[in-house]
Amino acid sequence: MIKEAFHKKASCLNLRRGALIIASMLAATAVGAEEQSFTEILPDQSIINSGVMAILFVGAFAFSMWSATWLIRERRQLDNSNRSLAMELADIKAQHDRAQALLDIPDQRVVIWESAAEPPICRGVLPSTTGAPKDSAQFIEFDVWMHPQSAQAFEKAVSRLREHAEGFDLTVESETGAMIEVQGRASGSRAFVRFINLSGDRAALATLEAQHTQLLETTDTMKSLLEAIPFPTWLRDNKNQLTWANTAYVRAVGGESLEAACRNGDHLLDANERTQIHNLHKQTDGDSFSTHIRKRLPVTVSGDRRIMDISDVSYESGSAGMAVDMSEVEEVRAQLQRTLESHSQTMNQLTTAVAIFNEKKHLVFFNRAFENLWELDRKFLDSEPDNGLFFDAMREAGMVAEQPDWKKWRNDLLSVYQESQPQEHWWHLPDNRTLRVIANPHKQGGVTWVFENITEQLELESRYISLTQVQGETLDQLNEAIAVFAPDGLLKLSNPSFQKLWQLTDEEVAADTPIAKLIEHCAKQTEYPEIWELFTSGITGISEKRTTIDGRLKLNNDVILDYALLPLPNGQTMLSFADVTAKVGLEHTLIERNEALQAAEQLKNAFIDHVSYEFRAPLTSIMGFAEILEQQVFGQLNEKQAEYVSHITTSSNVLHNLVDNLIDLAAVNAGIMELELKQLDLRETLRAASNAVAEQLQDKSLKLNISQIGGSSTYVADHERIQQILSNLLANAITHSPQGGVIQLESAYNAQHVTLRVSDEGGGIPEDQHEIIFEKFNSNTQGQGHRGAGLGLALVRALTELHGGTVKVDGRVEAGTSIICQLPILPEAETAPAVQAAQ
């Protein structure tokens, strides 16, 4: 404030100085202007001009002197004001320093709220032992580091301070148990809260006050609880006089109020009983008191004699007691005892053995049937044996079947004590008896064991189940429609297939339905209604010799049925229908397909014969004449003619190989190719294959590397077909190898197979085409620009599988193509698998 006043006066002085300067400049300007004006208007009146100039000069000089005097006086006043303001500023700085020192006193912290919109300001630091965080943002989260009750009281006090300017003084407790004094004050719109760490006697006093408050709250809570419970509760001093009791106690003694009961000495117990309890608290060897005495005593309440459990606890300044009415419990217990005796009498009349074990697994009840069933010593049963011990006794007596793991079997049975649902077991005893054992756990603990002898029942059930299984297996589960009729033509039973086949309702297939009613519905569904008259005569007819009647009929919906009328014992007859529509249709389809296959076989054979003659004869002539021309038998050929003849010879050989492959592949597909198996040498096979492609390798400057792995090299195969396989594999590798590349021909031999591998350095075959390349008329150019007929690899697979082997592309090779052909050492003579694969 002083600084602002000082600056304001300095600005005013500067403004006045500027005004004087501007006024002097204006006066000088005015004198010059007037002088010029008079000179211009009256140039000849020099005397008048001199007088005017003198007047103006005197006026300006007087104004300047007055201004200087006024300026000096204002400057003196401004200096006095500056000295006063400087002194006030020094006093304010001293007050500010003192306030700053007070805010930063150790072991205290101040929180200041300037306004509701601004965050609070924190100054000072509390010791770390208080549990208060040092960070200001964390400190103002009071509910985090304060005890919940202290935080709640503090928040309410701060709210009243900020809203209504109500100061407060509190002692709060931190989560670490430290006591902190809190003072809240308001000044104008600001709210100040100071936290002071308590130590020494002040801290101890604050702790005691907090404990005292908590103890009072706990006492009030316990008294409220005791007031709410329906059991009489009381407090006595060390003179055995009543000091406090709950409402239930006052009501039990018939008092008007607690004060009246204490004043009149109304007691729930008799004097002798009170004295007895008081004396029991004292031990014979001193004045020490026992902690707890519990007795069941008769008590008179509102004129009624009640049985109550009295619990009395002693302490240094008196005792406390509670009475729980057990009259209804005693009555229920007596009634339960009578019920148990009645149930025991009833149980002893049962033929089913029953035993009850309590929550401690001890035998507490068994009936006569139980005693007769197990024939154990009566003294042993009366001794309340453990359930596990009872099972062991049965085992020692040989009354139960021996188990592979007796301990596990027994523990599995005893696990019912931890279950809530009954368990059922089947015991097959060594004397061929069968027991149905039911273990029913009790909600209050314990288990009731029921042993039911069901040997005779099982025999009857077995017979019944056998009869029902015959019906179920022979009727209900059959796809054939079955119906059984009595001699009088009444329907006795039928299966669902019979009802579904003839589209009958449940009423129409009910028991004792006459066959005449079935004829009305079923005869209309067949093309031969008179067939049901045959069924009726076979069912109801009287004949010394009953025979089986069978045949085939067709329904209006084109369903074909095989029927059979079979005689049964006791004059009954079974009528069955089997749907053979699919079977008949399949027979016709197979006959037609067989005829078509035979026609195709004849067509294949005729095609092969025709192609063999029509293709090979002209090719032989072309190749023969080309060879004669090439040998120049009829005259010399010029260079161009010799070149053309060479092309004819080469193309003829290619076409001849193509025709041979086509005819061989067709022969394999037709199943007419036979292998001429004989023992071959693997080295000779590889050498012959190399010689066959030597000229083609030379034309493309290719190198063929041959390697062999394994011991013996003899195997059984068709030499000509093996050469065809290798020739086609090598031809494929030559076609797709780059100029000057290398081709690998590898062989491996073991006791079961001969493996041939041909690898090149071409562009490779995509993985999705590894199987397609072996199909007929599939030509994989592999980016070489050459497209063949697509028969070479197809013939390789056909001939390999004809030997019982396999062929595949090695997908593990990263560059080029590697084809593996695996042949058995001793191939089978059967060629059917190869035919199917080729097709």
Image (cartoon, grey):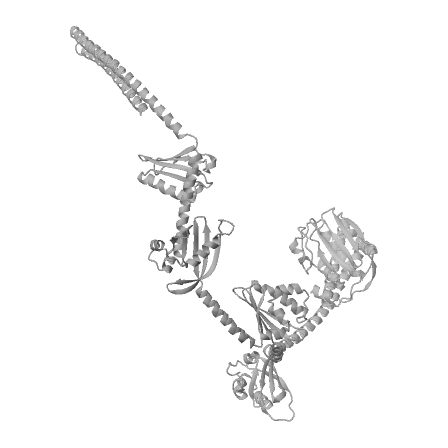
* Percent of width and height locating residue 752: 79, 59
* Percent of width and height locating residue 506: 51, 81
Residue drawn at 64 percent across, 55 percent down: 768
Q: Residue 226 falls in which quadrant of the image?
A: bottom left
Q: Nearer the viewer, residue 819 or 225?
A: 225
Q: Nearer the viewer, residue 84 or 496?
A: 84
Q: Residue 468 falls in which quadrant of the image?
A: bottom right
Residue drawn at 66 percent across, 50 percent down: 783
Q: Is residue 837 visible?
A: yes
Query: Vertically, is 814 above or below 112?
Result: below
On screen, residue 661 versus residue 31, left or right, reads right
Query: Vertically, is 21 above or below 807?
Result: above
Residue drawn at 63 percent across, 73 percent down: 374
* Percent of width and height locating residue 508: 51, 83
Residue drawn at 68 percent across, 60 percent down: 775
Query: Vertically, is 324 above or below 43?
Result: below
